[in-house]
Amino acid sequence: MTLSSEQLERDWAAMTPARAKALQVETARQVRLQPDGPAPVTVAGVDVGFENRDTARAAIVVLRYADLEPLDYALARLPVRFPYVPGLLSFRECPVILKALEQLRTPPDLLLCDGHGVAHPRRLGIAAHLGVLTGLPTVGVAKKKLYGRHGPVPEGRGEWTPLMAGRGSAAGKSGEGEVLGAVLRTRPGFKPLFVSPGHRMDLDGALERVMHCTTRYRLPETTRWADGLASNRGQRWLARLEQLPTPGH
DNA sequence: GCGACAG
DNA sequence: ATCTTGTCGC
């Protein structure tokens, strides 16, 4: 871990939307879109839920990459101190996520985040930001678009269309402009997912990781576990995790 | 002035 | 994100 959650809280104590935007532009320079290191042995899904208007709860579940069996998990709570502003999500959710990460017995090799990676107006969605803060490879998996444009999405499982930089709904002119991510069909007949690399990752790698983690549902197993735990009705998921052979709690 | 707008 | 009942379908 490159940074402690307490340190981050101090650093961001006086954060405002205006300062946050400026910090994003600086931080985005540290994002590396080159895959590195060996293939992942473990993958973690992370998500944040809100117990009420001012208490955030982060959930992280680590799965074995090979068979997606849960190996460890962590939960953390923290007061909310930044509003939800489209484009500034990381400033609201990163502190509590780092706190949960610190409680993990083994840092994962890869982090799948709820939200975008570099498919962001300033190229620093929460997955990219979290990657820089932790030094971990990350991938952004979002259910809705924040920024960019794209054409029709193919119907077959695993098929995708590029998400191009720019505003509006028109498809980016083919072969022109920067490709930020992909609109991926993980399940025929369902709305596609928005996948983009976060840090230490490229688009092909991101798509490969997401497809590997997505078996019989629209969302990756990592996201499903994390969503379940972060949710206000996550007791049912907790029951299964507390039976882990090598529990982290 | 009118849309778009992660979680 | 969260608030919420029933309902349609395998």
Image (cartoon, coloured by chain):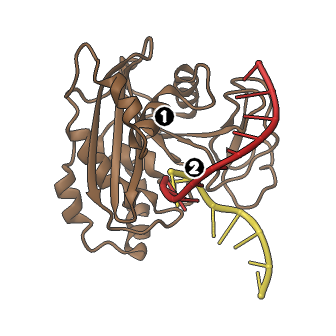
Chain colours: A brown, B yellow, C red
Q: Are marks 2 and 1 on the same chain?
A: yes
Q: Is residue A244 above or below residue A78?
A: above
Choose between A166 and A13: the one closer to the eye.
A13
Q: Which is nearer the N-term, disc 2 or disc 1?
A: 2
Choose between A232 and A175: the one closer to the eye.
A232
Q: Chain of mark 2?
A: A
State which quarter of the image contains the C terminus of chain A: top left
Tell me the mark number nearer the camera, choosing from 2 and 1.
1
Residue at 66%, 53% in the rendered image: A165
Disc 2 target residue = A119
State which quarter of the image contains the N terminus of chain A: top left
Residue A109 seen in render: no
Choose between A236 and A35: the one closer to the eye.
A236
Check if mark 2's residue and mark 1's residue have beta carbons within 8 Å.
Answer: no
Disc 1 target residue = A223
Q: Residue A244 occupies which quadrant of the picture?
A: top left
- Mark 2 falls on what kind of element? loop
Q: Which mark is residue A162?
A: none
* Amino acid type shown at disc 2: Ala
Residue at 22%, 16% in the rendered image: A246
Q: Chain of mark 1?
A: A
How many angstroms separate mark 2 from mark 1 (CA)? Answer: 18 Å
Q: Position of residue A219 (x, y in %)?
A: 58, 32
Residue at 57%, 34% in the rendered image: A203
Q: Is residue A169 above or below residue A116?
A: below
Q: Position of residue A247 (x, y in %)?
A: 23, 21
Residue at 42%, 69% in the rendered image: A83
Q: Position of residue A176 (x, y in %)?
A: 74, 47
